Amino acid sequence: MAKARKAMKRKPVKKTKTSARKPAARKSSSGAEPVIAYLTVSNGAGALEYYAKAFGARENARMMADDGKRLMHASFALNGGTVMMSDDFPEYKGGQRSTPEHFGGSPVAVHLNFKKPAEVDAIVARAAKAGGKVDMQPQDTFWGMRFAMFTDPFGHRWMFGAPLKKK
């Protein structure tokens, strides 16, 4: 038994060159952002309208599918970054749908950082007024942020945070 416990003890994690690296730059060497969220929705045109109204998103690109009804691809600027999205195309995935509505919600959230706590309150109020659902009202947290959680009408989860002033 003692040998089994000893074998189960975890060894300390060694710092490697990879783990000690500085955070990635805002843009990659190709000029693209290093990480971009890609959302799948059931109503692409409606989602673009909602994100503009709720979050102040600015549309960068819109490409319609051959059926003329769905968005094959779109991108929009949001809070200094880029989000991409498309309508769902189950016909290219063996009939499988892949929207949060189909799965009863999304296990993934997009987090937006703001500079001022008041910005968190403002964006949550705006997004709720546009038709989304507040999951966690803006509040000051023990980790030093003004923080809120939200679900948009398409089932995507959003988190908003801003640093609190140090006391």
Image (tube, rainbow, N blue to C red):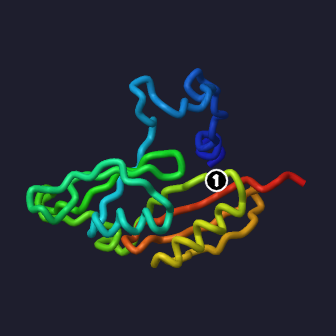
On screen, 7 above or below 66?
above
Residue at the (52%, 78%) spot, across then down: 129
Where is residue 94 drawn, in percent x and y?
Answer: 12, 60
Compared across the picture, whether 127 is left or right of 67 comes to: right
Residue at the (64%, 53%) spot, across then down: 114
Residue at the (34%, 50%) spot, across then down: 75
Residue at numbered disc 1: 114
Where is residue 73 drawn, in percent x and y?
Answer: 25, 52
Residue 164 figure quarter: bottom right
**Local crowd size for mark 1, using a 10 Å CA cut-off: few (<14), some (14–19), many (≥20):** some
Where is residue 122 drawn, in percent x and y?
Answer: 63, 68
Residue at the (33%, 73%) spot, across then down: 101
Find numbered disc 1 in the image and state the secondary structure of the residue it sits on: loop
Residue 44 figure quarter: bottom left
Q: Nearer the viewer, residue 93 or 2?
A: 93
Number of numbered labels in the structure image? 1
On screen, 132 above or below 16?
below
Where is residue 137 drawn, in percent x and y?
Answer: 64, 74
On screen, 31 above or below 109?
above
Q: Quadrant of the C terminus?
A: bottom right
Q: Nearer the viewer, residue 147 or 122?
A: 122
Mark 1: amino acid:
Phe
Which residue is farthest top?
Answer: 17
